[in-house]
Image (spheres, rainbow, N blue to C red):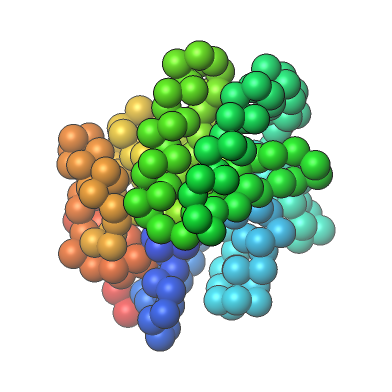
């Protein structure tokens, strides 16, 4: 019935500041489902390196995902040597599309830098010399920045962004956790109705609106926009925090019945 799980990482699997940060039942569930042939993808804003750090060192997962969708865009699969390899030509196309978008957006990004200077404590984020995003000190400041970015988008529809709490990453309009998930499912020959997606924040909205996953959920710690999107899509709003909520949702949908 279910063939692919797409789970955000921070705030959805990981309950930061809680011990343990992941409920043991989640690992039992993932192991059982994978033994049944279900694929598991972590779909995160983290970089691939940062995700590996989280899985192996920071939170010591006893099980590793089959796929990693990172930076809300790039799709990797587990390689035979235990590392990661790009899955198909999606990442290459994404890189080309982003190079074009960043070139076209240069005048807009100059305005974003000027706007950031007016937000106390806000910082631009650069990667390999490219201005790729920003961080603010408060949610309210990020709200203001996103309103400004929305105005800029009207001038360049290719230009979009992914927000996660007080962080924002600029992106090409065609790339999100949702479209990357859709690409992965398509390549695997998995239908939307066989996909489960779980997330808690703005950058998860694109995979929670029902377009790419038939089963969508959010844990109780999710932001209001996510809760509204999941509710609108006919998904499940869990009572549990992070991974406890994910397990609860899987039971709610009848996708996992066993227990410890
Ligand atoms: Mg999250």
Task: Judge whether 100 appears above or below 89 on screen.
Answer: above
Residue 138 in the figure: left or right of residue 170: left
Name the spot of residue 106 as percent of width and height, x first: 68, 24
Residue 91 in the figure: left or right of residue 2: right
Could one spot residue 242 in this view of the protein? yes
Which residue is at the front of the view, 255 or 180?
180
Could one spot residue 203 in this view of the protein? no
Name the spot of residue 75 as percent of width and height, x first: 64, 40
Task: Judge whether 2 appears above or below 147 on screen.
Answer: below
How many labels were placed on the picture?
0
Q: What is the quadrant of the N terminus in the image?
A: top left
Q: What is the quadrant of the C terminus in the image?
A: bottom left
Q: Residue farthest to the front?
A: 118
Q: Quadrant of residue 184?
A: top right
Which residue is at the front of the view, 66 or 168?
168
Which residue is at the front of the view, 189 or 42?
42
Name the spot of residue 47 as percent of width and height, x first: 66, 53
> Which residue is located at x 62 percent, y 60 percent?
51
Task: Judge whether 87 appears above or below 48 on screen.
Answer: above
Name the spot of residue 205 as percent of width and height, x first: 37, 39
Q: Quadrant of residue 230?
A: top left
> Which residue is located at x 59 percent, y 37 percent?
114
Q: Residue farthest to the bottom?
A: 19
> Which residue is located at x 69 percent, y 39 percent?
131
Residue 221 in the figure: left or right of residue 85: left
> Which residue is located at x 73 percent, y 29 percent?
95
């Amino acid at each position: 019935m279910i063939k692919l799980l797409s789970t955000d990482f921070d705030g959805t699997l990981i309950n930061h500041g809680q011990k343990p940060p992941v409920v043991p039942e989640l690992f039992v569930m993932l192991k059982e489902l994978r033994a049944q042939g279900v694929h598991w993808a972590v779909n995160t804003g983290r970089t691939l390196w940062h995700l590996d750090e989280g899985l192996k060192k920071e939170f010591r997962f006893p099980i590793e995902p089959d796929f990693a969708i990172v930076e809300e865009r790039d799709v990797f699969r587990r390689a035979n040597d235990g590392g990661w390899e790009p899955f198909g030509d999606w990442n290459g196309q994404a890189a080309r599309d982003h190079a074009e978008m960043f070139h076209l957006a240069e005048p807009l990004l100059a305005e974003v830098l000027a706007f950031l200077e007016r937000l106390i404590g806000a910082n631009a984020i650069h990667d390999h010399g490219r201005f790729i995003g920003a961080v603010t000190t408060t949610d309210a400041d990020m709200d203001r920045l996103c309103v400004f970015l929305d105005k800029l988008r009207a001038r360049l529809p290719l230009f979009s962004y992914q927000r996660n709490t007080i962080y924002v990453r600029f992106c090409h309009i065609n790339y999100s956790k949702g479209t990357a998930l859709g690409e992965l499912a398509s390549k695997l020959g998995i239908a939307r109705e066989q996909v489960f997606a779980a997330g808690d924040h703005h950058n998860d909205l694109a995979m929670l609106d029902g377009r790419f996953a038939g089963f969508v959920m959010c844990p109780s710690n999710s932001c209001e926009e996510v809760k509204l999107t999941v509710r609108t899509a006919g998904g499940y709003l869990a009572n549990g925090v992070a991974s406890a909520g994910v397990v609860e949702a899987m039971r709610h949908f009848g996708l996992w019945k066993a227990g410890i």
